Amino acid sequence: MNTTRRGLLFVLSSPSGAGKTTITRRLLADDPSLSMSVSVTTRPPRDGEVDGRDYHFIDKRAFDDLIATHALLEYAQVFEHWYGTPLAPVEQALEDGRDMVFDIDWQGAKQVRGRLPNHIVSVFILPPSMTELHDRLRRRAKDSEKVVITRMAKAVDEVSHYDEYDYVLVNNDLEQALVEVKSILSAERLKRTRQLWLVSFVAKLLGPN
Amino acid sequence: MNTTRRGLLFVLSSPSGAGKTTITRRLLADDPSLSMSVSVTTRPPRDGEVDGRDYHFIDKRAFDDLIATHALLEYAQVFEHWYGTPLAPVEQALEDGRDMVFDIDWQGAKQVRGRLPNHIVSVFILPPSMTELHDRLRRRAKDSEKVVITRMAKAVDEVSHYDEYDYVLVNNDLEQALVEVKSILSAERLKRTRQLWLVSFVAKLLGPN
């Protein structure tokens, strides 16, 4: 582990359609020191998704190999597909004292919390209403009504776990939500227990000069 | 206690001259929902200090009465004078779900932490160097060299307690330090455990509409 600072695992969860992906993208664009955890998944790519950027798309056999070799920090099944977080980039980030962002659901967040409790900071983004969420899901290009219904069921399940998170915000306005997420990241970086360099800084401050 | 939100007791400590008073003033000016805790003290007013705004200036006998009637949230002696925080305004703020700012030293912070652990958020502001701090103290109008030496000794004592605080920042640049303090306040307000209204909000979100 890095001796200068304790890297953050910044987990953002929300039901699909509550703005999490946009917020994550903006957060990464505005802070080059952050890196994104790219999940592995057995689900096929959607239109516009790029392998290695949005997900690492792999088959079930490769996924099972990752589980067997303890190469995943967390994994879970959602509907018929599997999702997981590669462990190696996370270990490297913590070794370097860097912060990583995770776009994972409550099941993933729970596993990361269990394994790296001193590093995780978890934020849940709520939609202003489920009607609003339903509208957003319907406005998305290719989603059939059946897909929308399935995602709404998953959304209800996801929201019911909001009370496992450190921070909660309501995305009434995207810009406001982004400012709030950034303030959480900024504040968490100022936590004394994360600033390992402070010990020697204060020793020097108080020592003979 | 308020059932909508859990009010914050936002404690800022730093050695004299590290910029805390300016930061506190700016914080209050920019956020009208915040109120300041005005301490009682037995020390005489300095030039420009206003009774009831900077401190409530009282004599030792009145101070002892406040202690005897449990009217102080915390109190401590610093050099030959006594300082304390009136309890009633704090109780009222928590009852109303409002946030209060405290400009108190490590002894005061420790007592507030002991009595209201679920409400206190503590921030320690470090100077970039003790030389810089010494210069700032000397630049202040009326301080004799003897007063500066005494304050430097107190500053060293104060800094040695930085590791009792939740957040720590170095005031290299006042504007940057103010932004950091504001991000801490903003993030703490987004903590799930402080947003008591979320329970009913989510129940409504997930309930029949």
Image (cartoon, coloured by chain):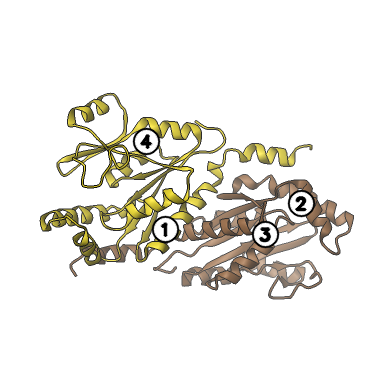
Chain colours: A brown, B yellow
The reply to whether label 2 and label 1 mark residues of one chain is: no
Pointer 2 residue: A133
Pointer 4 residue: B115
Camera-side residue of B177 and A149? B177
Q: Residues within 10 Å of mark 1 (few under 14, many from 20)?
A: some
Q: Residues within 10 Å of mark 3 (few under 14, many from 20)?
A: many
Residue at position x 14%, y 57% from top? B149
Pointer 3 residue: A20
Counting from the top left corner in percent of width and height, residue B27 is at: 42, 51
Task: Check disc 3 and give the amino acid type.
Answer: Lys
- Please report whichever mark, 2 or 3, sits nearer to the chain's N-terminal start: 3
Residue at position x 84%, y 51% from top? A149
Q: Is residue A12 left or right of residue B75?
A: right
Q: Residues within 10 Å of mark 2 (few under 14, many from 20)?
A: many
Residue A110 at least partly seen = no
Residue B71: name its quadrant. Answer: top left
Task: Check disc 1 and give the amino acid type.
Answer: Leu
